[in-house]
Amino acid sequence: QAQGQKQKALYKGASHIHTESTKIAPLDEGILIQTSGVDVGESEASIYYTQKYAVRLHENPQFNFQRGRQGKYLEQPIQQEGAKVIKFMQDEMKKAFR
């Protein structure tokens, strides 16, 4: 049960960061966001953007993105929401041991 709870906590935490990221990721036709997602392993979670231009857009915040979109679209939510996500995940794990 603890392993299942850990994976649930990882998924929920990564999904929250992914959701926040898609709110600010560059949006032209929506392909970048449509080809993003979350994967969860035994003890880690990954948030991914699969388009070949994803890294270039992420690493160049000086680009003039439309409608308030921006570079660093994954890094910024991690920095802003990271502490909240860690707390949330800790609370989820405590449920497994009650």
Image: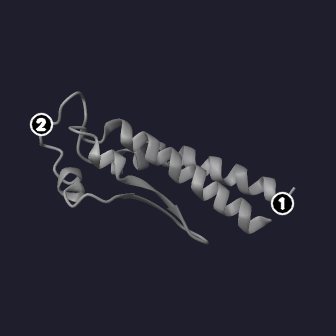
Q: What SS does tag 2 mark? A: loop
Quadrant that contains the N terminus: bottom right
**Quadrant in the rendering for residue 44:** bottom right
Within 10 Å of disc 1 (Cα), the crowding (few <14, some 14-19, many 20+) is few
In this view, which residue lies farthest toward the bottom? 42
Inspect the image, locate mark 2, and give the three-letter code of the amino acid beneath it: Asn
Q: Position of residue 40 (x, y in %)?
A: 55, 64
User: Pointer 1: what residue?
Assistant: 97
Looking at the picture, the colour scheme in use is: one colour
Q: Position of residue 88 (x, y in %)?
A: 64, 47
**Quadrant in the rendering for residue 24:** top left
Mark nearer the N terminus (1 vs 2): 2
Residue sitting nearer the eye, 66 or 89:
66
Residue 21, placed above or below residue 45: above
Which residue is located at x 71 percent, y 51 percent? Answer: 92
In this view, which residue lies farthest toward the right? 98
User: Pointer 2: what residue?
Assistant: 64
Within 10 Å of disc 2 (Cα), the crowding (few <14, some 14-19, many 20+) is few
